[in-house]
Amino acid sequence: MKFLFYSICFLLLSNQIKANDENNTKCQAYFTGILEAITNGEIPQNISAQSLLSSGKGLQDLGSYLVCRDSVDLHYIHLRMISGGRPLHMGFCLPQFCEMSYLQTFNETTKSFINNLTHLQYNRSMVDSVSYQDPELMYPEWGVGTYLTLLLLIVVVGLNITGSILSIIAENKKKAYSEDLQIEIQKKAEKINDSKIEDQSLQSDIIDEQYRRSELIQNEIMENQESAFMSGKGQFEEITYEKYKEPSWERLALSFSFVHNYQKLFKINEPKGENAGFVIFNGIRSLSIFWVIFGHDQLIRGTNSFNLIDIPYKITEPGWVTLTPAAYFAVDTFFFVGGFLATVLLLEKLTKLRTIKFTLVPAMWLHRFLRIWPTYAFCILMYWQLSVYWSDGPIWNEYIASTSTCNAQWWKNLLFIDNMFSHANNGLSYCFGWGWYLSNDFQIFLITPILLIIYAKNKQIGLATIISLLVGSIFSAYYIAFSHNYHLQIGTPNSKPQPDYQDVFYYKPWVRISPYLIGILFGLFYRNYISGQNQRIVDLASKIKESVFIRTLLYIIGIGLTQTIIWIIIPLQKDMDAWPPQAQYFYQAFNRVLFVIGVAFCITPALLGCKNDPSRFILGHPFWQPIARISFCMYLTHFIVILFMTFSSTQLVYYQYSHILFFTLTDIVYTIVIGGLVSLAIEVPCMNLEKILFAPKKHEAVKVNSNQVGEQIDL
């Protein structure tokens, strides 16, 4: 389709806008010359070969952006079109005097012309709006927020560099103190031993007995990590010394030390204790964030692909595409894990308290806020204020447009209330759009301590409250889907528009809370088993651990539930009417609940301590530990990576499975690197500072036996 010539011809035939200045006059004369040549059946002489070759030849053809940009007398113009909420693109390489402001006067006429062409070729009008944009003029002005964000970035980098240097100095100082202390203790021990030996002619059996007694005491010291010495004569006298006390500057330095935090973040730990089975959550978190990246890669790259016209037909094919709408189960898995861990850890703390009061709740809220907010706020600022200047490209203005939504909505995200507002345009006009999960997570956590305190005070009332909330969540999901006649969010060719689906259904905590509540119930089951408070649960757990048949049955049910929930929607990919409406309402109400129950069944044997369990072997492998630790920062940064890589490209990708899989793997690697850096620079230092402020470390005097000088002293 000779789209370039047709569109230019149409613009020339439209005389609605007259040139008002010299550049506009030149541009109008330029198009007039082209029109006259085409009318006479001649090749236009005023179009340079470079201009023609560097312009797009059809929809989704961006032309040669770099070649056009480097030309002295040419500049690049991006024709941006919107079709059903999705962007369409085309690139033109035009003379410098054809400015964007002049071309924008033809927006409506261009829209009509394109719709006439697409109606002839595809039997439908494809374009809802049209605008001409110059990528080099789309960058926003530097404002106060930009300068402050840049200053914040410089401060963060400076703190990490300074902290790393100071931590190295502190480690050397600590090492020197340790060596001096060893020498000092050696001298004291020799002095004590010399003063205690009264008779050099002791018989050998007495010496042996003293040695055996000394050895027993040494073992007790090592096991209990405290002094236990014999009274009376002999060589067993205590030496008291002050443990090395870190000054405040050292503790702050270690908080921001890149080196120290790297060792802490990426160290592989061997699981120990009653909660050793928690290592399986490392694999669950890692695989879930990979699934989220895959789903968003499909969404962004699929809607900005060269062969966009093929997408509705690609969607009907089962396989990789089926995993895309099912990717939100990965987020539900995060909710489930969050509910489980919050329940187990908070109940463990509550049981250690003499009295349980609701006044503890604000402290728990504050801890949660400090755990999430600083890193979240930093990522929003980087995305909103600075990242727009880090690249360019023919469609880079799409990235700039996505960040510009934060101009008016940033405060909603920072208050964790953004999911409560309307985001228009299919719910996509959203600052840091993937932040809805964090808002839901924080809002749900607000009631979690209250539920657990109620449970700790009265198990029956607490359990009834949790189950009632679960039933209410399932019912609300069904009612909303029924009252709004919502079908599944799949881009099936015959699916009807649902512009308010995201705002009314998808983002709301009363719909998304159900997996979290399943996690709480599963956490109560586990806690009762560990504590031994409920003998029936202990007996049930023992049967599961001892019976291969029961464990196999759990796997069959769990895998069956998860896989059925994922793949049962295949008929809807071809025809949205393949299921009756009631079936779709029911599925939307129960799908996330049944999926996380299936996950719970699969991981139950591993949590109960079955070491040879497949879940423990696969999900609990040490490989997942570092990825799981940075999964929060990976979630915060992954969408930025996808948007950045998509819109900084000079050509649109041709959509096919191999390409999308390749880009997904690439984006996973980039996200691991960037998420790891953010975690090291922001997340871990903030966690360290919180411990310093709210849980200061106590330094106590240490006792050592005079015979234990050779033992390593913990500083």
Image (cartoon, rainbow, N blue to C red):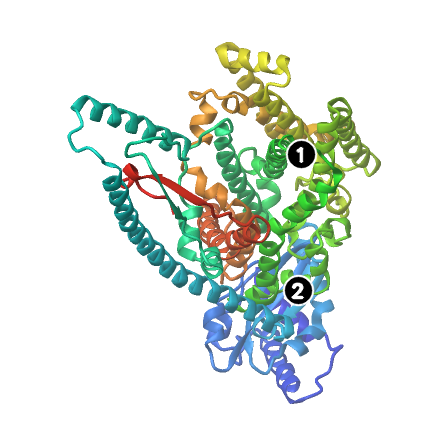
Q: Position of residue 276 (x, y in %)?
A: 48, 29
Of all residues, the one furthest to the front in this rendering is 198
Q: Quadrant of residue 152?
A: bottom right
Q: Residue at x 29, y 50 (%)?
A: 184
Judge left or right: residue 355 versus residue 681: right
Q: How would you rate the neighbour count of disc 1 (Cα within 10 Å): few for under 14, some for 14-19, many for 20 or more?
A: many
Q: Earlier in the sequence, mark 2 or mark 1?
A: 2
The kind of residue tagged 2 is Ser
Q: Which residue is mark 1?
A: 516
Q: Is residue 306 visible?
A: no
Taking the spot 30% from the left edge, 31% from the top edge, the residue there is 233
- Residue 618 appears in the figure: yes
Residue 258 in the image: above or below residue 98: above
Residue under label 2, please give it. Answer: 404
Q: Position of residue 10 (x, y in %)?
A: 67, 70
Q: Residue furthest bottom?
A: 22
